[in-house]
Image (tube, coloured by chain):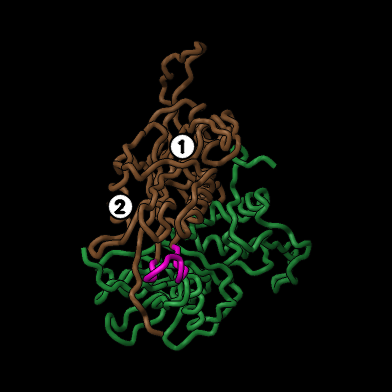
Chain colours: A green, B brown
Amino acid sequence: MPHSNTHHEVLIVVFQVRHFPATAQSPRSGPELAVLLWQRALDPEAGSWSLPGGRLHDDEDLTTSARRQLAEKVDVREVAHLEQLSVFSEPHRVPGARTIASTYLGLVPITSDPQLPDDTSWHPVSHLPEMSFDHGIMVENARARLAAKLSYTNIAYGLAPSEFAMSTLREIYCAALGYQVDATNLQRVLSRRNVLVPTGTTAPPGRTGGRPPALYRFTDSRLRVTDEFAALRPPA
Amino acid sequence: MPHSNTHHEVLIVVFQVRHFPATAQSPRSGPELAVLLWQRALDPEAGSWSLPGGRLHDDEDLTTSARRQLAEKVDVREVAHLEQLSVFSEPHRVPGARTIASTYLGLVPITSDPQLPDDTSWHPVSHLPEMSFDHGIMVENARARLAAKLSYTNIAYGLAPSEFAMSTLREIYCAALGYQVDATNLQRVLSRRNVLVPTGTTAPPGRTGGRPPALYRFTDSRLRVTDEFAALRPPA
């Protein structure tokens, strides 16, 4: 079996929870999970929307490449979490020379507002534009991974501000999961698992008056599995 | 930045829980987590031990390649679970042309005893022989992933017989995790999460007499996250 030249690219699915103006197509007014896309000016598939990324260089590993390529689109200091996801290796996934794509998940906190190049913008995951090649599948794959990890890790630290009221965290979970969750339940479960701690302070009084809400922060800012259930916990 | 030719290989970390004879080096007599390795007859690194795998062919995707390459070492019908793990992409990870390695996790049930080629054997993960290149790191990476997944998925179906007493499942968990877990706790947690169901039958009476143990099976034989905790569960 001869081996022709194969290229390797890195593509990053960058998510942020963002407020979009309500439209007839998208009547929801709450924040939504959004993905960072750029529009192809040239063929193949000119006009379609692509994930940020590109060819792996000879002198870099995949994670170094992901950070370099993200830096061309957004200030990478605004990416709070970056992790490797699946490899897409179908032999004819793009026209021309075979190109294997390693995908990454990147998370940007709700409070960041990165400057973007002219060809790049945020799109609600629920209403993607015409996507290039297999990039739409990659977004869905990353969304499913994020939703699963929200239930057994502390990954929401990548989407949340450094300090937040539970109402904000609830909005982030609802947007990332695509369905409603209850703030009281969320706080109870995350506190019991030591994912959250109260900061001991409260938010500045809001415009509506009322009691200012207590603020919380994530215990860790590195990914960890939060549900090592009792039977399987290693001896202390 | 010029791009020289880059190769892509697939390497599979195949685990099985196995009984090894006690030795001075390894005095434990219970079953242990074992990994399938073959010994390199030729340089580079002749005599060291490698994971099964090899070059990706032009006409196959990674999973197809993993199954093909596994078939050269073991009957792949004995692999109950196969999933993609990390990509190893350090530019100089092997001598010669750059080779990017996609790793897979494969699980073989404790009751299988696959026929192996002469150069291939099972090794306890706790006492690995001299490993080729970065293959030792790949084994540790896969072991850590397996241990984490045991706590939030039903992945143990890949290591267990189709029907089993809780004492057998406990041995499998202890071996895979590397520490003791309690059979009563394990049964309680896995039953509550609907991971296990009783078959309604019991094992044949053992040599020691006594009450024959109840048998269980896994509810699913596809991977699923078993801890979508209440606050985050989608509406029914």
For the point 25% across and 71% down, which residue is it? A4
- Residue A186 is situated, as x and y percent measured from the top left of the image, at 61, 53
Q: Which residues are magenta?
A: B88-99
For the point 49% across and 30% down, which residue is it? B21
* On screen, residue A225 above or below B9: above
Determine whether, in the image, residue A227 is placed left or right of residue A54: right
* Separation of residues labelled 2 and 1 (CA atoms): 22 Å
Residue bearing the label numbered 1: B17
For the point 46% across and 77% down, which residue is it? A59
- Residue A13 is situated, as x and y percent measured from the top left of the image, at 45, 70
Determine whether, in the image, residue B198 is placed left or right of residue B189: left
Residue farthest to the right, as pictured: A200
Tag shown at residue B125:
none
Which amino acid type corresponds to the residue marked 2 in the rendered image?
Answer: Gln
The reply to whether residue B152 is in sight is no
Q: Quadrant of the C terminus of chain A?
A: top right
Please say if the residues under marks 2 and 1 sit with CB atoms less than 8 Å apart: no
Say which element carries label 2.
helix
Indicate the quadrant where residue A42 lies.
Answer: bottom left
Magenta stretch containing residue A72, yes or no? no
- Residue A140 is situated, as x and y percent measured from the top left of the image, at 39, 63
Say which element carries label 1.
strand
Please give the chain letter of the residue carrying mark 2.
Answer: B
Magenta stretch containing residue B97, yes or no? yes
- Residue B216 is situated, as x and y percent measured from the top left of the image, at 44, 28
